[in-house]
Image (spheres, rainbow, N blue to C red):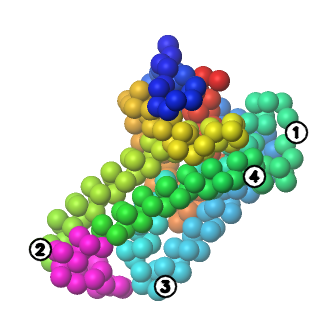
Amino acid sequence: MQHTTHITSIPLPEIRTLGIQQPLQWLRAAWREMWREPAISLAYGAVCGLAFAVLTLVLMRAQRYDVALALAAGFVFIGPLLAVGLFEKSRRIEAGEPLHLFKILTAWRRNPSQIRGVGLILMLIMIGWIALSNLLFAFLFKVAPPTGEQFFNTLFMTNQGLPYLLAFGLIGLVAVCVAFAFVFCSIQLLLHDPELDAISAVLISYEAVRQNLMVTAWWALLIVLLTFVGVATFYLGMFVIFPLLGHASWHAYRDTIAQ
């Protein structure tokens, strides 16, 4: 079953109704795709995992535990942007095109300005979340967020700590949900259709999530669980999990949007 999307005045693709079993099918298809020229997928995962691990170490060494926490939670904001090459690999496998490493690494050049536009939207959402969290901290504790051990002492040894953590989590949940709806299939759309603009792609992605709320919520939960495993292993698990989610996200797009 398909629904016609009416968001702008231009013709937009139809959105299919998804089944609850499809997210697991996306992961199975992604696992098979990872082992087609596995060096490409695993290299993406290794670079991503090492970059996040190094950045987390730098932040912890600087005793900015609050920013390190936001970085781990904010993986959903930048993960899809980092996965453009993985989307391109999946697209090429589907189209029967050769897997040229250079073309995969430079896939963002198919629609650079609009992909950057989606990245800007995600960055603004993440900045808004961090800014609201800092304002909330200042309102409850009457000081700016401290660094080092004092940060954890303030959170867990004061009466205001629990309300802050609950509010921080709620604000983060809203931000992550909005970001997920915007990037569920927007970057894949821009990669597949260079004529599409960022705003239309984001709105189509949002509409796809809205029309398949239960299935996309289940998919989001799987992403969170797998990402948690990757982060809990100090990003070593991301060597495999990141390319797996990248290829699966391409299949999520292809099953959702009727071409």
Q: Earlier in the sequence, mark 3 or mark 2?
A: 3
> Gap in Å between the C-alphas at discs 1 and 3?
44 Å
Q: Which residues are magenta?
A: 134-154
Q: Amino acid at mark 1?
A: Pro
**Type of residue at label 2?**
Asn
Q: Secondary structure at mark 2?
A: loop
Secondary structure category for the residue under label 3: helix
Residue wearing tag 3: 61
Q: Which mark is residue 109?
A: 4
Residue 137 can be seen, yes or no: yes
Q: Is residue 32 above or below residue 153?
A: above
- Spatial CA span between label 4 and label 1: 18 Å
Q: Residues within 10 Å of mark 3 (few under 14, many from 20)?
A: few
Q: Residue furthest left?
A: 159
Q: In the image, residue 94 lies at what x, y percent?
A: 76, 30
Q: Provide residue 23's location: percent of width, then percent of height.
A: 52, 31
The main secondary structure of the magenta stretch is helix
Residue 98: mark in rendering: 1
Q: Residues within 10 Å of mark 1 (few under 14, many from 20)?
A: few
* Dot placed on the residue nearer the N-terminal end, 2 or 1: 1
